[in-house]
Amino acid sequence: MTIYSHSENETMEAGRRLAEKLRPGSVVALYGGLGAGKTAFVRGLAEGLGVRARVSSPTFTIVNEYPGRVPLFHFDTYRLSSEDELYDIGWDEYLERGGVVAVEWSENVPGVFPEDTVRVAISPTEDGGRRIDIHLPEAFE
């Protein structure tokens, strides 16, 4: 599925739409450069999951936890130097807690994702917008 966005609100709406398809235990791997709109996408995802808290990028904390109809565990792996660091902070436990796990900078930890991970790539378009490519595993279709 490909969505074109020309504003932060449209990027958030793409996240809200994806949230409708997710279930407890889903993992969403986000890819894209600095300023691509990954955090805006996760804000929409959070709204779609019933999270009422203000969602911000966990760049320095690595993970933020948000309660909602379905809890959201929001990771930012930008500052990690290895997949081992992610395991050291309890990656396996987060996967087992029954929430949705969203990971920014997923390209930094490519070997940690389950087979049924939803992959979201956000890239700039020539007109200043964003192209959002969402790859759903067969289990979601």
Image (cartoon, helix red, strand yellow):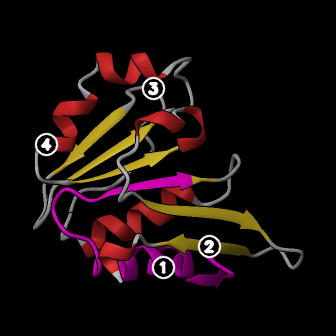
Q: What numbered label is drawn on residue 132?
A: 2
Q: Amino acid at mark 4?
A: Glu
* Residue 104 in picture, x, y percent from top left: 50, 46
* Residue 124 in picture, x, y percent from top left: 78, 66
Comes first in the chain, label 3 or label 4: 3
Q: How many residues crowd around disc 4 within 10 Å: few (fewer than 14), some, or many (20 or more)? A: few
Q: In the picture, residue 45 is in which quadrant?
A: bottom left
- Label 1 to label 3, Cα distance in Å? 26 Å
- Label 2 to label 4, Cα distance in Å? 28 Å
Comes first in the chain, label 2 or label 3: 3
| x 37%, y 27%: residue | 61
Q: How many residues crowd around disc 2 within 10 Å: few (fewer than 14), some, or many (20 or more)? A: many
- Disc 1, SS: helix
- Label 2 to label 3, Cα distance in Å? 25 Å
| x 40%, y 44%: residue | 113
Comes first in the chain, label 1 or label 2: 1
Residue for badge 1: 14
Q: How many residues crowd around disc 3 within 10 Å: few (fewer than 14), some, or many (20 or more)? A: few
Kindly tell me whether residue 8 is visible in this rendering: no
- Label 4 to label 1, Cα distance in Å? 26 Å
Comes first in the chain, label 2 or label 4: 4
Label pair 2/3, CB-CB below 8 angstroms: no
Q: Amino acid at mark 1?
A: Ala
Q: What numbered label is drawn on residue 60?
A: 3
| Dot in front, 4 or 1 | 4
Kindly tell me whether residue 139 is visible in this rendering: yes
Span colored in magenta: 1-30
Residue for badge 4: 96
Q: Nearer the viewer, residue 96 or 129?
A: 96
Q: Nearer the viewer, residue 128 or 133?
A: 133
